[in-house]
Image (cartoon, helix red, strand yellow):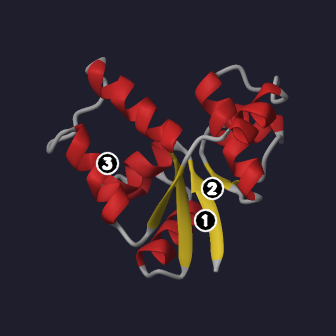
Amino acid sequence: MKRCLADTHALLWHLGGAKARMGRAARRWLSQADGQRVQVCVSVVTYWEVALLEEAGRLGLPSGFAAWCNAVETSSAFRVEPLTSGDVQIARDLRALRDPHDRLIAGTALRLGVPLLTADARITDSAVVAVVWD
């Protein structure tokens, strides 16, 4: 089974019905996950980013944060990945990425040996991790 790791915005857009904002390849991977042909991993760092966005009022979760997390965790399309010390070790070396969340998520993708579903140009341009989007 193919696997990938979803960046925070990719997961939010997918779950929020904003699939038109996503690249064709990313949409295909996520639709295959819904059909259980692809496993989409979600870093626990994504939970933290979503919590911060909601707290700052930049993101509205109609059912609330706990329900959003529960929806991810109970979906057969997703697998929540913990943050490990290995992820942090890898992230320390990803100096081309300035955002600490990006570094941790990319480090997790590298540990897992999977591509990252992301539209983030900084991550794509850095070429530190394989990216799936367009």
Instruction: Indicate the position of residue 16 as horizontal and vertical percent values.
Output: 30, 51
Task: Identify which amino acid the numbered label 2 is placed on.
Answer: Trp
Q: Nearer the viewer, residue 93 or 98?
A: 93
Report the side of 82 relative to 71 (left or right): right
- For the point 39% across and 56% down, the residue is 14
State the CA–CA distance, disc 2 to disc 1.
5 Å
Which corner quadrant of the image does residue 105 belong to?
Answer: top right
Sequence order check: which comes first, mark 2 or mark 1?
1
Q: Are marks 3 and 2 in contact (CB under 8 Å)?
A: no
Q: Are marks 2 and 1 in contact (CB under 8 Å)?
A: yes
Residue 25 got which mark? 1
Instruction: Indicate the position of residue 66 as horizontal and vertical percent values.
Output: 23, 42
- Disc 1 is placed on an element classified as helix
Task: Identify which amino acid the numbered label 3 is placed on.
Answer: Cys
Would you name the residue on which mark 3 appears?
Answer: 69
Where, quadrant-wise, is the C terminus in this rendering? bottom right
Count of residue discs? 3
Report the side of 28 relative to 51 (left or right): right
Whether residue 68 is situated above or below residue 27 in the rendered picture: above
State the CA–CA distance, disc 3 to disc 2.
24 Å
Sequence order check: which comes first, mark 3 or mark 1?
1
- Disc 3 is placed on an element classified as helix
Task: Identify which amino acid the numbered label 1 is placed on.
Answer: Ala
Would you name the residue on which mark 2 appears?
Answer: 133
Which corner quadrant of the image does residue 7 belong to?
Answer: top right
